[in-house]
Each structure stands twice: as C-alpha cells, then as structure tokens.
C-alpha cells in the first residue's frame, strides 16, 4: 500500500510544483523582477528582446529526491539569454522579408514558439504577397498540440472565423478552453494565474527598460551627428540606424503581443457567453475564473499598448 501511495503522490506533487513554477515564474519568492540593468553602449544586443528557453533547474523534493524541472521560456535580451545558457527564438519584426527563413528551421525542429511565429507570418501575410490561412492553421496546430497557449488561442480564432479551416464554433471554444487553462481545482488555477502575472510584470519591466535605454541612446546618437542646414537633414549614422531599427522591431513586437492578448480577451468573452448559455448546467467556479482572467488580460493589454507608445516616442 505504501509503495502505491508513493507512486500516486510524487507525480501529483511534481504536477503542483510545475504549475506553481510555470514558464517565467522563477523569482516569485522575491516578488522582484530578476532583470540585469542595461548598461548603455555595450552593444546592440543589449536592446534585442528574444524568447529565451532557459535550461531546466535542478530541484529537491523533500530530503531524498532531486529532479530536473522543465525548461522555462522567458523574454530576455539576446545578450542576457546567452549569459544564462539559454537558446532563443528571434523574430525581427523590422525585417519581415527574412523572418520566415530565420524561423522555419526552428519551427520544423518542433519549437512551439517558432511554430506560432511562423503561423502568425502566414496568417497576417507578413512579408508575403497575401495571407495563407491554411498554412497558418497547420503551424498553429503543431504548436497548440504541444500545449502552447498562444497557438491554441490563434487556432481557435481561425476556427471561429472559418479561415484556413472549416468554421466550427465547437472546435473554436474547445481550443479557447485549453488556452485559458481552466481547471476545477481552484488552488492550481490561482497558483498558475499568479505565476503568469509575475512573469508578465517581469517581461513588461524589461520591455520598458529597453524602451527607455533606446530613447537615451538615440538622443545621444542624434546629438553626435554633425549639424547641417535644415534643407539638407543629416542621414542617420550606422549606430543610429541600428538603434532605430531595434526600436521599430520592439514597437511592433509589443503591438503584436497586445493584439495576442486582445484575442485572449475575446476568447474569454466567448467562453463566458458559452457558460451563460449553459444556464443551470454552467459552473460558477469556471465563471469566476473567467472573470479573473478577463480582468488580468485587460490590464496586460493596456500595459502593452502603453509600451508600444513609448517605443514610438523612442524613434
């Protein structure tokens, strides 16, 4: 009996720990964003934000058991990701023509973040003659089946609108539910939501930090340009042009992330309507969870729009 209980209990505890330490949830115990200050002038890589996949942490459960935690995906600067031993996916939104070539190898290798980005390129027709919704659905599905929430939301959106796939409200709601992470266990839901909020705060702080540093460096680069008559404005120097490109890339990235969160809000609203239509069969606990998710995502949406505006001013 004891061995059976051990077999049941250990996976359960690992599952709970995995939820509490969701991707990007490190440093929750401090309540602080673990961000290394950017030292202006070190190099352009200090201003390039990437999706960084960090190595798994070795953790101890009790006094006898150690295990390797899953790898964590976080937003970081390119240089910081390298220092921390991570691998990254870079989507330079200021150069859509080469983005697909850069992302496809990682997407074909099974990386869900790269697969979602490729799906976005096809869905929005970024750098393409026209959107390709069928290809977008195909790539979103590959990432969604790996439980990547952004891809699940995007695939649900295609089903809702009938783009690249047959219009199917049931399929749409199913993918929306999976993306929302709704669970009958309130403790797990609250823990996961708290981890997501902490991760978003760290990411937002980093985005704003990069925006502020870019503004400062662009002012310095502009001031160092030799003065010319108003009729012949000076062309930006190499450093200034690179900084402007990074500011534009980060602005588009923040705007795209805001659009993704807006889709999540829409998905949550669709789920709320579905719960309301259920009448007596609706679950009050799920309704409360959806309300909290909607409030959280709306706050994130507004914060990302503000960051996008800051990056517009940086240019």
Image (spheres, helix red, strand yellow):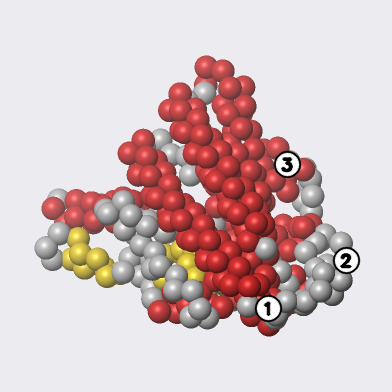
Q: Which of 94 and 105 is in front in this view?
A: 94
Q: Residue at x 48, y 67 (%)?
A: 76
Which of the numbered marks, if any, corresponds to residue 225? 1
* Secondary structure under the numbered disc 1 in the rendered image: loop
Instruction: Using the image, determine if residue 191 lies above or below residue 283.
Output: below
Q: Residue at the top extreme?
A: 280
Instruction: Give the percent coordinates (x, y) of residue 301.
Output: 58, 44
* Quadrant showing the C terminus: bottom right
Q: Which of 174 and 203 is in front in this view?
A: 203
Instruction: Give the percent coordinates (x, y) of residue 252.
Output: 67, 60
Would you say the residues marked 2 and 3 are in contact, meaning their CB atoms lie under 8 Å apart?
no
Q: Which residue is drawn at 56% across and 78% down?
A: 44
Give whichever of discs 2 and 1 has the lower sequence position. Answer: 2
Q: Distance between the residues labelled 2 and 3?
A: 24 Å
Q: Which residue is drawn at 31% across and 69% down?
A: 57
Would you say the residues marked 1 and 3 are in contact, meaning their CB atoms lie under 8 Å apart?
no
Q: Nearer the viewer, residue 87 or 44?
A: 44
Nearer the observer: mark 2 or 1; the answer is: 1
Give whichever of discs 2 and 3 has the lower sequence position. Answer: 2
Q: How far apart are marks 1 and 3 (CA)?
A: 52 Å
Q: Report crowding for label 3: few under 14, some 14 to 19, many 20 or more residues within 10 A (C-alpha).
A: some
Which of the numbered marks, if any, corresponds to residue 129? 2
**Is 6 on the left or on the right of 208, as rendered?**
left
Nearer the observer: mark 2 or 3; the answer is: 2
Instruction: Using the image, determine if residue 158 lies above or below residue 237.
Output: above
Count every numbered label the image shows and give the total. Answer: 3
Give whichever of discs 1 and 3 has the lower sequence position. Answer: 3
Q: Which residue is drawn at 39% across and 50% down?
A: 198
Which of the numbered marks, if any, corresponds to residue 51? none
Residue at numbered disc 3: 160
Instruction: Give the percent coordinates (x, y) of residue 175.
Output: 60, 46
* Secondary structure under the numbered disc 2 in the rendered image: loop
């Amino acid at each position: 009996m004891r061995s059976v209980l051990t077999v049941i209990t250990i996976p359960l505890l690992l599952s709970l720990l995995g939820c509490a330490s969701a991707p990007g949830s490190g440093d929750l115990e401090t309540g602080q964003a673990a961000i290394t200050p950017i030292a202006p002038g070190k190099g352009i890589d200090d201003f390039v934000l990437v999706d960084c996949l960090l190595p798994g942490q070795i953790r101890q459960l009790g006094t006898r058991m150690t295990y390797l935690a899953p790898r964590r995906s976080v937003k970081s600067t390119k240089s910081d990701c390298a220092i921390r031993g991570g691998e990254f996916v870079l989507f330079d939104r200021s150069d859509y023509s080469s983005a697909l070539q850069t992302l496809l190898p990682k997407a074909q290798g099974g990386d869900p973040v790269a697969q979602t980005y490729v799906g976005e390129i096809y869905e929005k027709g970024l750098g393409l003659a026209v959107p390709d919704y069928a290809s977008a659905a195909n790539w979103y599905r590959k990432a969604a089946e790996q439980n990547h929430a952004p891809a699940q939301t995007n695939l649900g959106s295609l089903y809702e609108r009938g783009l690249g796939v047959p219009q199917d409200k049931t399929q749409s709601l199913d993918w929306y539910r999976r993306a929302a992470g709704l669970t009958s266990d309130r403790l797990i839901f609250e823990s996961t939501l708290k981890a997501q909020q902490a991760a978003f705060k760290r990411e937002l702080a980093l985005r704003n930090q990069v925006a502020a540093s870019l503004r400062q460096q662009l002012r310095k680069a502009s001031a160092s340009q030799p003065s010319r008559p108003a009729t012949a404005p000076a062309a930006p120097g190499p450093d200034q042009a690179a900084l402007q490109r990074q500011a534009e890339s980060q602005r588009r990235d923040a705007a795209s992330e805001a659009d993704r969160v807006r889709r999540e809000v829409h998905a949550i609203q669709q789920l709320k309507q579905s719960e309301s239509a259920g009448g007596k069969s609706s679950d009050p606990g799920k309704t409360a969870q959806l309300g909290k998710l909607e409030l959280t995502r709306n706050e994130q949406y507004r914060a990302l729009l503000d960051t996008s505006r800051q990056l517009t001013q940086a240019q």
